[in-house]
Amino acid sequence: MMVGAGVGLAAVGFRWLIVLCTEVFCGREDCSVAGHTANPHVPALGLWFLLLAPVAGGVLYGPLINRFAREARGHGVPEVMYAVAEHDGRIAPRVSAVKSFASALCIGAGGSVGREGPIVQIGSALGSALGQVARVGAERLPVLVACGAGGGIAATFNAPLAGVMFACEVILASFTAEAFGVVVLAAVSASVVGRAVLGSNPFLTLPPFAVRSAADYPLFALLGVFGGVTGVAFTRVLYAVEDGCDRVWRGPEWLRPAVGGLLLGAVLIALPQMYGVGYPVLERAVGGRYGLGLLALLLVGKIVATSLTIGIGGSGGVFAPSLFVGAVTGAAFGLVAHDAAGQLVAPVGAYALVGMGAVFAGAARAPITAVLILFELTGEYTIILPLMAAVVIATLTSALLSHETIYTLKLTRRGVDLDASHQSRRLRNQPITAALGPPPEALPAAVPLRSAAVALARAPHGCLPLVDDAGRYQGVITVKAVADALDVPSRATRSAGHLAVQRPSVTTASSLADALDAFEGASSGGIVVLDPRQGHIVGWITHQSILAAMHPPPASRQAAATLPGDGPQVGDQPSPARQAAVVVPEAGAD
């Protein structure tokens, strides 16, 4: 509840900060529908202020992000998912402040991004900071992070149910009774604070819509397919533009948003409706006030403008842009349906609303969130059935076209596999040198079997590596193989190399996860670690050494194990001297 109340206040402050920055750079509270007129602060510039505003904003937020919190760059949600997956939910507290100012400056200066991604990151950082101050355990800290994310969505959209589902579907990627209940408390707290300050009206003003006949359902299903395809296309264009900006830019990162702001400004001059979040334009599209040609232009323009804003190093979310893209996609689909069937089909606005949910589901693959947020925005239960159908079809279409979502793709490109368990990701990040031990004395492959048997009798692991004359690894020889061969007179005269087993091996460049995979092909003993260039044996790993690297004993236990005067511990091996005292009788004994 403390996290939810704090995020509710943060959401209110963040929205006011965006309005303040927009009025400074644009001269109005919103510039997306009034961008065809000059900025009243600098009327002499005319429409050219649209070219300069992103540059001025980039000059301010570029150094801010680069100096204090580079994770504040981009759309925010993947960074939260990464913190939960790789760092047990630990997020630096400074991220909240940096993300707030950087995103407000970016959106206020014309960045075509949303405020929902930033408030998710801001709320998650607040939840993480509070959990760290309270010394919450690593297994519970991610739940507080999810509380911050869900509270942020709840307060920003005035949609507590959608906030809860977003936190469970996207941030935690799991549903448990405990996590659900705690996130509900945070979302309720955030919504109460937000409504007390901002009122209880939805953030969008939408007219009521209804489905007129059962004939609309096949059209809504078809819209779901288009929504899924559009969501995937939006994702691919977003990262393609970001890759292009990375390849082209060779200057300092703090200057990148300012220089790239010239390209964004050129887009805004051509299409001022792309300025900022663009909720008034979205409302007009849902209201059926745009023609088919302009809707197509807005669709392409929003995808390009959002991708460019993120690509040049801007800070803002992709949640609202995906809703914008969905609204114009659905409105265009509705206009085509009306041209074909006239008044027999639902109003254009109904298709626009369903398109919002379908495209968001296609991009984020969070169907429950998509359904609930549109239901909470409209309050119209009559549209819930076509909305559910379109969202599910969009999700399935997206899954067929792409394995990744608009959030997970950023992490996959970094090498983070969210489908793997936390322990698996931890093992992939640990080098094999953490479990590396000295190799046993290798046997020449040409050594006779009887000599190999003598060496194996002294080997602690029941196997020894074999090398050729140049010292290159040739395989492993085991006790069982030698014993079986010595029982057959015709095979007893062979060399050890004839019994070499090619077990899986690893190199010094491998990880502990690679070592465990290699052990799947080795029944017992150990595995050699090779030099990746020359193929020489440089180390030896066992199951025990991997376990010791995964779970190192506390220093106190290590110290206690070496205290003088302690008797033998469970599992200790007796020393050679103690072994001799046990098995060698004294002279004159019976």
Image (cartoon, rainbow, N blue to C red):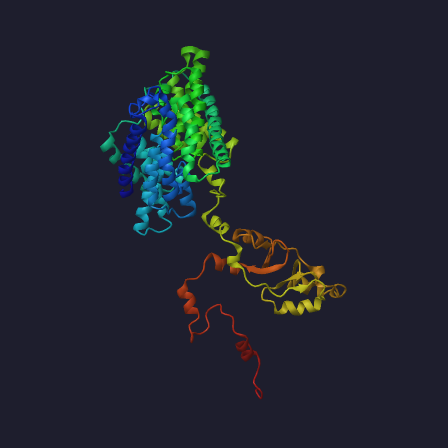
Q: Residue furthest bottom?
A: 588
Q: Residue furthest right?
A: 490
**Image quadrant in which you'd find residue 341:** top left
Quick one: 382 or 335, which is closer to the camera? 335
168 with respect to 241 (left or right): left
Q: What residue is drawn where x is 42% and y is 25%?
A: 266
299 with respect to 493 (left or right): left
Percent coordinates x, y for residue 190 in the rendering: 28, 37
Residue 340 appears in view: yes
Q: Residue furthest left?
A: 196
Name the quadrant of the C terminus. Answer: bottom right
**Image quadrant in which you'd find residue 307:** top left
Q: Is residue 133 above or below residue 371?
A: below
Q: Is residue 456 above or below residue 51?
A: below
Quick one: 60 or 587, which is closer to the camera? 60
Percent coordinates x, y for residue 100 in the rendering: 32, 37
Percent coordinates x, y for residue 296 in the rendering: 45, 19
Question: In the rendered picture of this protein, how many numbered marks are placed on residues?
Answer: 0
Residue 80 appears in view: no
Q: What residue is drawn where x is 42% and y is 21%?
A: 270
Q: What residue is drawn where x is 72% and y is 60%?
A: 498
Percent coordinates x, y for residue 167 in the rendering: 37, 38
Quick one: 128 or 243, which is closer to the camera? 243
**Image quadrant in which you'd find residue 491:** bottom right
Q: Is residue 482 above or below residue 238?
A: below
Name the quadrant of the N terminus. Answer: top left
Quick one: 136 or 487, which is closer to the camera? 136
